[in-house]
Image (spheres, helix red, strand yellow):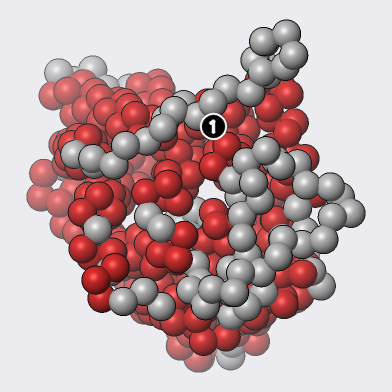
Amino acid sequence: MADASRSLLRHRDFVKLWTAETISVFGTQITFLALPLIAATTLNVTPFEFGLLGAIEFLPFILLSLPAGVWVDRLRRRPILIASDVVRAIALLSIPIAFVFDALTIWQLYLVGFINGCATVFFDVAYQSYLPSLVDRDQIIDGNSKLETSRSAAQIVGPGIAGFLIGAITAPIAILVDSISFLVSAVFMVAIRRHEEKPERQVDEHGRGASMRSEIAAGLRYVGRHPYLRSIAATTGSSNFFSNMLASVLLLFLVRERAFSPELLGLAFSIGAFGFLIGALVAGRIGVRFGVGPTIVGSAFAFGPSALLVAVAPPDLAFPFVATSIFVGGLGGAVYNINQLSLRQAITPQSMQGRMNATMRFIVWGTIPIGAIVGGFLGGVIGLHATIWVAAIGGMFVFLPVLLSPVRSLGAMPEPIEDGATSPSRDAAPPTESADDGLVAAGRQPYLEAGEE
């Protein structure tokens, strides 16, 4: 492990990145609650219009993830982070301005949600790709742990702060605070001083740059052929599928069949959210103690079956079972996220970081709406409780792809593939392990998203 002199708390540029992200994720909790409240209460939209708002916010993650990865690999990452923060700040600022002039409409919320989603796609891909160039390789897991700690803390206390703020100054005006948080985040990003080299554009023998389509294809091949990445994608994607199948019916089940009040729901999720925080704090130590591979496999094995606690809960003990389920799932999910993300960042060459992260996100987030749709369909056909059983049983097996892959034998972090070797052969052996002992995600779903945020 790194000595005290190499602590990231002494790394000024990382502290600036960490501060920027912490301010941003706390601010985001306001918009996460305020935007749907504006639609439901201020604008009194129909159920269809309300549901469409969530779909529009999610749409950029499907449409733009792969192209965003190409641009992140073509450009410096820090300017993308700054521009994304500024765009989100301006978009959100339009809501309180329109509200003050009595001009706010659902169409503006749709536009703001879509713009905000587009900027978030670019920010997230650039953000995950920027960390490995900012800190040393053996500090990556520590960096991800600190960033995940902030995210977990925001999920625990953020909704309470957001609710109080919205109650005090109304939802549209509260969004102004989130807008300011993005501007402050951008200022801290600007203050980072480490020089970032502009990526070299790959050209053919005629001096022509690769097309967007060919670079997207290269990212897909890289992940699909990599012995570690494809198994991580399979575990994370299948986990997101089953966890969102569960999430799509869980609230209805708890309210209609277990008589949970809104206060009891909030308390259960708040207690469970501490699992995310504890997982973020101990993820690095567990990875060092047991090895990064066994930690990834073990944490996937832990969070998968956690939904069984909801399925088997007796009606009169539903609350402690649900809270424990969310706690265990969050603990395992945070440990898994930090270690698998750190592994991906450490083994991928800088020239492929953007496309790798974008491809992984496209795959593992692509299962989210499918799981939600399947869960909603099954809930209407076989019932809410039976659907929870199906999701819980399916979640028991999500650890198999990483268990049956070379990931399980990883002790120390393997060395990255050289920049020139961006498409490892399908039959190639796994990258050689490093002799170094130093080892190297969120929160849109209400239950457990074991994959990256």
> Residue 67: x and y, percent?
60, 27
Looking at the image, residue 256 sits to the left or right of residue 382; the answer is: left
Which one is in front, 26 or 439?
439
Which one is in front, 427 or 387?
427
Looking at the image, residue 441 sits to the left or right of residue 382; the answer is: left
Camera sees residue 23: no
> Residue 425: x and y, percent?
84, 47
Whether residue 184 is situated above or below residue 368 in the rendered picture? above
Whether residue 152 is situated above or below residue 219 in the rendered picture? below
Q: Residue at x 63, y 78 (%)?
A: 411
Q: Quadrant of residue 139?
A: bottom left
> Residue 412: x and y, percent?
59, 74
Q: Residue at x 22, y 35 (%)?
A: 190
What residue did someone put label 1 on?
A: 73
Camera sees residue 437: yes
Q: Residue at x 21, y 63 (%)?
A: 10
Whether residue 422 is situated above or below residue 247 in the rendered picture? above
Looking at the image, residue 450 sits to the left or right of residue 185; the answer is: right
Farthest right residue?
Answer: 427
Instruction: Tell me the quadrant of the picture where the N terminus can be found.
Output: bottom left
> Residue 262: x and y, percent?
36, 67
**Mark 1, residues whose alpha carbon is within 10 Å: few (<14), some, or many (≥20)?**
many
Q: Residue at x 84, y 55 (%)?
A: 428
Indicate the secondary structure of the residue bearing disc 1.
helix
